[in-house]
Image (cartoon, helix red, strand yellow):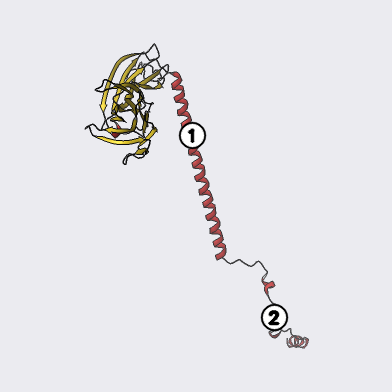
Amino acid sequence: MANRAVLYFLFVVEVFPKGQTVLIETQQTVMAAVGEDVHLSCQLMQSRDVLQVTWQKLSPEGKKKNLVTYNEHFGQTVNPGFQGKVEFKDAGLQNCSIVIREAMDQDECCYLCLFNTFPDGSLTGRTCLQLYELHEPILQITESNSTEETVVSCLATGRPAPTVTLNVPQQDLYFSHNSTVSVTNTNGTVTVTTTAVLSGFHGNGAQVGCAARLLSVPEIQVFKTIPAVKQSSADGFDDESGSDENFTLIVASFATVAVVCVAVVITVVTVLLRHKHKNSLSHRDAEEMKTPQKSTQDPDECKTPLMEKENEQIRKRSPEKKDPKEEKPEPSSSTVRRLFSDK
């Protein structure tokens, strides 16, 4: 963001009643970026008997505050309230310089360096600190309603107001419209926006640049390439290559969706079949547990020896049944002869 301070030297001439002149070399104006360390110096150009050197801060109301002092007896002294903020860089009775750490808005004022001499009294030099603030510019490129026009905007923020310039190296591009707007921010900085409409653009990836300047501070530049814009046909569709790419993309998308759907269906069917098979096995196992198994052995084989013995005793006790024909007694031979004799 910041660049080193630019120094302006001025010879300050002090005129005394006796006509003697003393030259003090100091910096009339010191420019520094906000937050930067600032170096202030004073040098006595003629030899004098200097007892002490003092640096003072001069407020806009004209009030003076002692910052630091130096003499050979007490050495370097930083007054309370400025310790850690102001330091000696070179401490001497002929050449004395200080450093202000991280200069902020409250440090932007004038400073006095006093050479207390004997017998001439105090010789004073004056230098003023001016802070600046310059941020890197922002370059924006947007498409216009026309395919051969491009809107380029560059904005930069600084204090005081920076100068913003758009640069187009290509010869086939030109500015058809250019405008600049400045807006003051609450913190005292100013935002400057420069907008231009570039004509003659044919999608060749031209490069544009933006430069921000502030007083004598070196400018900050940024560059950006205008993206190539595809030309559209009269019927509103892109050219043939663009159509082929879109068609290929659509086909690939549908194919991907179809594969995913088939995979989902197969997964669902597999899960259902596994679930149905599992339920069938569970039901069959339950039925087998409820129904006792039938014995395949011969009933006679199931009889024990004790039962066979009891059955045999029962058969012996019970008379066997005879056939009625066999129970009828046959007539004896004497009875037969008797019957025939009677006749």
Foreground tag (1 vs 2): 1
- Residue 316 in the image: above or below residue 100: below
Residue 141 seen from this side: no
Q: Is residue 111 above or below residue 324?
A: above
Q: Which mark is residue 256?
A: 1
Q: Secondary structure at mark 1?
A: helix
In the image, taking residue 276 as reference, residue 309 lies left or right, namely right
Q: CA distance from mark 1 to mark 2?
A: 82 Å
Looking at the rendering, which quadrant does residue 286 occupy?
bottom right
Q: Is residue 61 left or right of residue 168?
A: left
Q: Considering the image in quadrants, where does the C terminus appear? A: bottom right
Q: Amino acid at mark 2?
A: Leu
Query: Which label sits on residue 218?
Result: none
Residue 306: which numbered mark, if any? 2
Q: Is residue 141 left or right of residue 342?
A: left
Q: Residue 33 at x, y = what percent?
A: 35, 29
User: Residue 123 at what x, y percent from top left?
Assistant: 29, 27
Q: Earlier in the sequence, mark 1 or mark 2?
A: 1
**Secondary structure category for the residue under label 2:** helix
| Image: 83 above or below 127 | below
In the picture, residue 305 is in which quadrant? bottom right
Name the residue: 46% across, 20% down. 241
Of residues 198 and 1, the one nearer the viewer is 1
Q: Residue at x 49, y 32 (%)?
A: 255
Residue 223 drawn at (x, y percent): 40, 21
